[in-house]
Image (cartoon, helix red, strand yellow):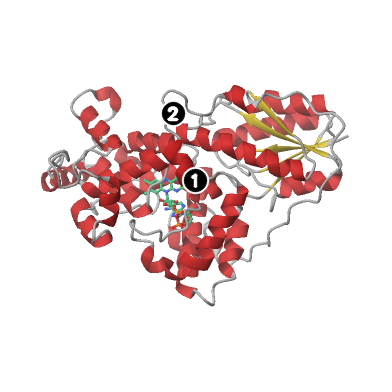
Amino acid sequence: SPSLVWFRDDLRITDNPALHAATDAGPTLALYVLDEESPGVRPLGGAARWWLHHALVALREELDRIGVPLVLRRGAAAAVVPAVAAEAGAGGLFWNRRYGGGERRADAAVKQIARSSGLRAESHQASLLHEPWELTTRQGGPYKVFTPFWKELSSHDFRHPLPAPQRQRVPEKAPWGDSLEQWGLLPRDPDWSVPLAEAWTPGPRAAGEFLEEFTDSVLSGYSEDRERPGQAGTSRLSPYLRWGHLSPFEVWHAIGRRRHEAPGGSAAFASELGWREFAWHQLYHHPDLATVNLRREFDAYPWWSKGDGGGQAALLRRWQRGRTGLPLVDAGQRELWATGWMHNRVRMVSASLLVKNLGIDWRLGEQWFWDTLVDADAASNPFNWQWAAGCGADASPFFRIFNPLTQEKTHDPDGTYTRRWIPELGTPDYPEACVDLKESREAALEAFRSLPRNR
Ligand code: FAD
């Protein structure tokens, strides 16, 4: 009987322990389930749906090369996965772990159903360098501060990546599957995906090329250039890591091999991978990270949210469309809208403007990023929004309110970035600033000072 591998956020054939274990056991089938039904599993945003479509095309090609047919199905995982295993007459079910609350519940249900029907069901570690429950503070709890977390994490040795499995004998029969087109993941009317496709090629092959380009040409200057949004000074690996076209082990060791030639860049980059791990550590311990302030005293902060009516709805729209009149923020928001990605420095400045100067609830910004980012993930996005809003783990102190004009001078001094994204900059078509930065800063600090402490 064949093995069944259930693919999720690990859309690759190299360094894929679940796929390895399955193929070691014999002929293998692969399954991807579009699950928009399991409670607590967040439906994908628009840009992510676009990415997923192309990622599955690429995965199918890779799997075909090693004799593993890919079956696509839709529905709640706990119903679909055991049903496909039964239809395939599978002897074993394999997957790599997920860490969100709803995902863990769904996976536990599948495991229980599978095992009660006598099926071998196995989960593996593939998407994080560490399991979130393995690292604890001396008191035995989760980490709240990055530096000691990173010190602990980076003192470990991480396993080397696994190669792709050898070509298999194709299983004699495969269960029925949906066609990818049936899922309607691509935008139709209007089709906003053209600039996305110019910016990105989803799939492991392009991921490998990005990684090589980065380690060969960008890594040595990474420590300085990473703060320049006008330059290609960062890796742009985030969507490839998000979708698991690359594993963090592959990235970790590729960077490690360059640590003598590019010591500063390698160390700075490794710690960014550390922030990714830290975000997942937080999500694992706080499954409601996208909705609840980690620092509960912020529950009393008078943020505006959608139900409240009033003028901020127009401000939210201006922010989303890149029409705030603050060039660095507008350039970032337009970059996001066009390409599904925004430079990290600009994400921080843009988020600070929204939650501090415009007084809009961070959850609305988080939701917008969720819908528009190709790298949106269930941990990094809410984690970083809470960080930017001051209510998260090891967050940026609330009183550190970025001034977008000063930030622009420091990080885009010659205007390369702003001019690239705002052709009408300096003409009457470009709007005035939508907010008085000084007054709104004072108002935010005042609201912060009046929060009840130590709840
Ligand atoms: P590089 O500088 O090359 O970093 C390498 C890798 O490290 C990234 O690919 C990413 O996997 C990881 N990384 C770097 N910084 C962070 C960070 N602060 N938190 C978590 N991981 C990090 N990143 C996401 O992957 N998904 C998100 O949904 C996301 N939402 C964000 C929202 C806000 C408000 C902010 C301020 C940041 C967010 N980030 C998110 C973090 C960061 O902006 C991106 O990871 C980074 O810009 C990706 O570009 P890169 O791959 O070139 O980064």
Q: Quadrant of residue 202?
A: top right
In the rendered structure, the answer to whether residue 210 lies left or right of residue 327 reads right
Camera-nearest residue between 327 and 78? 327
Quick one: SS at disc 2? loop
In the rendered structure, the answer to whether residue 285 lies left or right of residue 358 reads right
Quick one: SS at disc 1? loop
Q: Quadrant of the N terminus?
A: top right
- The residue identified by callout 1 is 200
Camera-nearest residue between 95 and 121? 95
Count of marks, rendered view:
2
What type is the residue that disc 1 sits on?
Trp
What type is the residue that disc 2 sits on?
Asp
Q: Quadrant of residue 252?
A: bottom right
Q: Quadrant of the C terminus?
A: top left
Crowd tier of the residue under label 2, counting other residues whose Cα lies within 10 Å: few below 14, some 14–19, many 20 or above: few
Residue 43: x, y in percent? Answer: 51, 29
Ligand 1 within 8 Å, label 2 CB: no
Residue 26: x, y in percent? Answer: 86, 43
In the rendered structure, the answer to whether residue 455 lies left or right of residue 188 reads left
Q: Quadrant of residue 25?
A: top right
Residue at image x 12%, y 43%?
A: 436
Residue at image x 26%, y 33%?
A: 316
Residue at image x 26%, y 31%?
A: 317
- The residue identified by callout 2 is 191
Of callouts 2 and 1, the N-terminal one: 2
Residue 254: x, y in percent? Answer: 59, 64
Residue 437: x, y in percent? Answer: 14, 46
In the rendered structure, the answer to whether residue 222 lies left or right of residue 248 reads left
Ligand 1 within 8 Å, label 1 CB: no
